[in-house]
Amino acid sequence: MPALTSDTIRTLPETLADLTDYLRENPDPAEALALVEPLLDEYTGLPVQFADTLRALARAVQENPDTPRTAQGDRLITELRTTAWELADQHTLHYVLDDLRDLYGSSPRSEQGCC
């Protein structure tokens, strides 16, 4: 794996900002759903990946021998893990995407073959 840098990681939030700007321009719903779909995938989407990232950070901090063993440090590690669980719970957003696809596919406009 190539070395990660803050510059390479920074591309993710920049890409998300670009996506948000694009979605604010009222694109075709089918196209918008296709662009958002990978972000909400049940197994590899952002909620799951970010939760895994936070858990890995908590583990890296906790297992580092230079980490001070204090109540505050323990609390911060616990907070990272708690937040990770909360984020992982958001994996159910992929069901919302399924429902949106169904809604769009059965909308009166698409049933009439209109625009």
Image (spheres, rainbow, N blue to C red):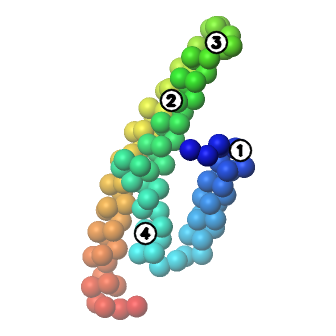
Rendered location of residue 97, percent (x, y): 37, 60
In the image as oriented, which residue stretches furthest toward the right?
7
The amino acid at mark 3 is: Pro
Crowd around label 1: few <14 · some 14–19 · many ≥20 (10 Å): few
What residue does disc 3 label? 65
Residue lying at the far top in this picture: please name it.
70
Q: Kindly tell me whether residue 22 is visible in this rendering.
A: yes
**Above or below — where is 20 with respect to 51?**
below
Q: Which of pointers 1 and 2 lies earlier in the amino acid sequence?
A: 1
| Image quadrant in which the N terminus is located | top right
Going from N to C along the chain, the mark reached first, 2 or 4, is 4
Q: CA distance from mark 4 to mark 3?
A: 45 Å
Circle 2 sits on which residue?
55
Quick one: label 3 or label 1, which is nearer the N terminus? 1
Q: The residue under label 4 is which amino acid type?
A: Ala
Q: What's the amino acid at mark 1?
A: Ser
Q: Is residue 2 above or below residue 51?
A: below
- Give the labeled residue for mark 4: 34
- State yes or no: discs 3 and 1 in contact (Cβ < 8 Å): no
- Mark 3, secondary structure of its residue: loop
Give the Cα separation between the discs numbered 2 and 4: 29 Å
Assess disc 3: are there few (<14), some (14-19) or many (≥20) residues with their C-alpha within 10 Å of its C-alpha.
Answer: few
Q: Residues within 10 Å of mark 4 (few under 14, many from 20)?
A: few
